[in-house]
Image: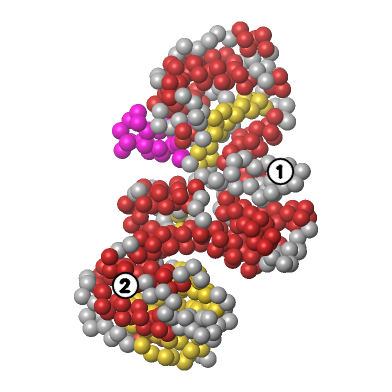
Amino acid sequence: MKKRFNITGNCNSSEHYMMDDRRRFAGILQMVEFGDYFVINRPRQYGKTTMLFSLLETLQQDENYIPILMSFQGISDSFYASSDTFSQFFFKELKKELDIPENGFPKEKLNSVQAVHTLDELSERITEVMRLTEKKVVLLIDEVDASSNYEPFLHLLGMLRSKYLQRERPSSRTFHSIVLAGVHDIKSLKFKLRNPDDAQVNSPWNIAADFTVVMEFYPDEIAFMLRQYSEAEGVQMDFEAIAERLYYHTSGYPFLVSKLCKNIAEYILPKREDKSKWTLEDVEQSVKLLLKENNTNFDSVIKNIENQEDLHELVSRVILEGEIIPFNQYNPTIYKGVLYGIFKREGSIQVHNRIYEQLIYDYLASRMLTRPQSAKMNYGGSFMQDEGGLDMDNVLRKFQSFMKEQYSSKNNHLIEREWRLIFLAFLKPILNGQGHDFKEVETSEEKRLDIVVTYLHYKYIIELKLWRGEKAHQKGLKQLTGYLEKHSVAKGYLLIFDDRKQPSWKEELITHEGKEIFAVWV
């Protein structure tokens, strides 16, 4: 069967090219073997459902286990009408799954177990059913977010918690392990059945083991998938270099890696004359294609930023102002950013991957373009040079003029927060779909932002910095020349925000360590 790169639903190795999942799976399987109750809580499209199906298949082949996979997504609200109603539904589903011949449950004994009418009876029946087998029964529940707002489901978790705490007693025999999968960590959801302020302390699932398995894929695990594709399709590539570049842009986020590969295989390669190999440039082109499209993953990122003011403010401080904010998992705003896949767990808060960073920049710049004063930003193609490139000197001069006209009398503190975003918005109509601006953030006390602008086959490096005196200026020149050397570019651009009471509004052509730098103060 011909395979493809999959970005929707469950992945399986017979139909899809898959990254090397052995490390992730081994960590999760070990938790099951230890008898842990835990939650695979990661953002959407992280491979949680695929992992549950892999667990199901592996445990089905082990004579010591009976795995049961359930999902309550899409069931009628009537099942959540009360704890008794939900208990009846749950037990029917449990018996149906246990009745599969492969599980080896004695059918007559299973059928003799009486029906359930209440939550207390459900607890008793679970113990009764577990006594019918010497095997370890593992309960897997997918998409728990669909149920977590309903009190009956939370009462179920509370009952299972009580049985877990007494599991050594014959009268409380229960599931060997329970694995829940969803975006939220059940331990810290602000459930409806209690005061939200107490939710983190009084969770019905605070018995859950911490889930520490790294679910992102590393470059060698990405290269594993590329080799599969190469062997099947006869396409050559430098596996390690391509995998490293995919990881560079995605930080190993499963959906993003697969989507970039899918773009190359299905949209970029077929249009090229030489279809025999992948190149690093293909990865860059795939990133550009991805950032132009709408998808549910991006929709979720933007929705979560837009709908939550505290998260919007924190994201802006981190990626626009370059603030270094220590990571703390107990901070509710930081936790939300991690929960939705926007931040990663590091010593300081960082956007999870470069694609999300670019996506958020582009979104914020677009919002800036809808402001009334931004109407004067649309300069069309007036900066085109005869050979087809951009007259970047005049782009910066025009931006300086724009800032002087529109913002010189405004509150300096406000403008200091926004000037980078204003410049990014200023660039958009100039590039007009013919070019691409990619941000390289340097998180440091320098608060610098490097922008790589590609326009047709031309490349321009622009560094944005705050004025911090002559000593810092010289250091910035050195940094920029090093960056120009890295990109093999002879000329660079320096845009300096001068927040002194009497800004200079000057420009200067500087030669530094063999590189030419055009600097403009705004």
Residue nearest the viewer, comparing 120 with 173:
120
Residue type for callout 2 = Lys
Residue type for callout 1 = Glu
Q: Is residue 190 magenta?
A: yes
As helix, strand or loop, the secondary structure at mark 1 comes to loop
The residue range painted magenta reads 184-207
**71 above or below 339?**
above
In this rendering, does residue 158 appear at all?
no
**12 above or below 328?**
above
**Residue 230 shows which numbered tag?**
none
The percent coordinates of residue 50 (x first, y second) are: 62, 40
Residue nearest the viewer, comparing 36 with 458:
458
Q: Which residue shows up at 43% across the image and 16% down it?
A: 84
Q: Is residue 96 left or right of residue 237?
A: left
In terms of sequence position, does the residue under pointer 2 or pointer 1 come before the other? 1
Q: Which residue shows up at 57% across the image and 54% down it?
A: 256
**254 above or below 410?**
above
Q: Which residue shows up at 38% across the image and 90% down it?
A: 508
Judging from the image, the colouring scheme is: secondary structure
Q: Which residue shows up at 73% across the image and 31% down it?
A: 61
As helix, strand or loop, the secondary structure at mark 2 comes to helix
The percent coordinates of residue 506 (x first, y second) are: 32, 87
Label 2 or label 1, whichever lies nearer to me, is 2
**Residue 15 shows which numbered tag?**
1
**Which residue, given by chain and number where applicable, does mark 2 sit on?**
376
